Image (tube, rainbow, N blue to C red):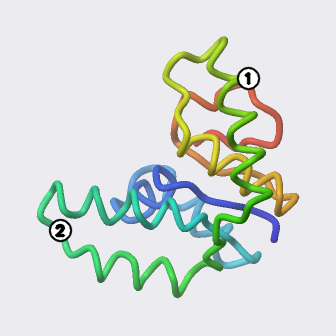
Amino acid sequence: MKFVFDSSAWVAYLKGTAQAEKLNEILETVLVGTSICALAEIADRCEKYNQDAEKAITFIEAKATIIPITTDILLRAAKLKNHLRKTRPKFGLFDALHLATAEQQHATFVTADADFSGLNNVLLL
């Protein structure tokens, strides 16, 4: 796995933002993964905006490998969250789960979330 997308990357892709073309290039050339947490966030966003969550999830499942949360990932996420919260007060547990998932996959983490700015192995859209 070369890249792991978070929910903000999927939202950018699905909305057809300026970054969508870059994301499409990635999706067409390499294996992409996404945390199961991203699917939960996408479903939540779809419900909030009265959009078809099942359609969005099915689309993402067709484009990416869905990566479950393992004990190793959740333990690493807890450490990341507490460490990064010292300098990034808005850095949440789901943020840490996404980042830990990418680390576990030895992949570049792709996000549109500025909370990840300046971190290693992060492609900020």
State whether residue 11 is above or below residue 62: above
Q: Residues within 10 Å of mark 1 (few under 14, many from 20)?
A: few
Q: Quadrant of residue 104?
A: bottom right
- Figure quadrant of residue 36: bottom right
Q: Dividing the image into 4 quarters, which one contains the N terminus?
A: bottom right
Question: Image check: 13 left or right of 56?
Answer: right
Going from N to C along the chain, the mark reached first, 2 or 1, is 2
**Residue at 75% in and 34% down:** 79
Q: Nearest to the eye among marks 2 and 1: give it.
A: 1
Q: Report x, y in % for residue 94.
A: 53, 45
For this view, does 20 lie left or right of residue 57? right
Furthest-left residue in this view: 50
Name the foreground residue: 118 vs 105: 105
Determine which of the numbered discs, if any, sits on residue 51 in the image. Answer: 2
Q: Residues within 10 Å of mark 2 (few under 14, many from 20)?
A: few
Label 2, secondary structure: give it.
Answer: loop
Task: Point out the image quarter for the C terminus.
Answer: top right
Name the spot of residue 96 as percent of width and height, x first: 64, 41
**Residue drawn at 63 percent across, 39 percent down:** 124
State yes or no: discs 2 and 1 in contact (Cβ < 8 Å): no
- The residue type indicated by label 1 comes to His
Q: Amino acid at mark 2?
A: Gln
- Residue drawn at x 43%, y 54% is 12
**Residue 6 x/y as whole percent:** 55, 54
Determine whether, in the image, residue 4 is placed left or right of residue 21: right
Q: Which residue is mark 1?
A: 83
Could you say which is closer to the camera, residue 52 or residue 92? 92
Q: Which mark is residue 2?
A: none
Q: Secondary structure at mark 1?
A: helix
Q: Who is closer to the viewer here, 90 or 49?
A: 90
Residue at the spot 37% in from the left edge and 62% down from the top edge: 42
Q: Where's residue 24, x and y in %? A: 57, 69
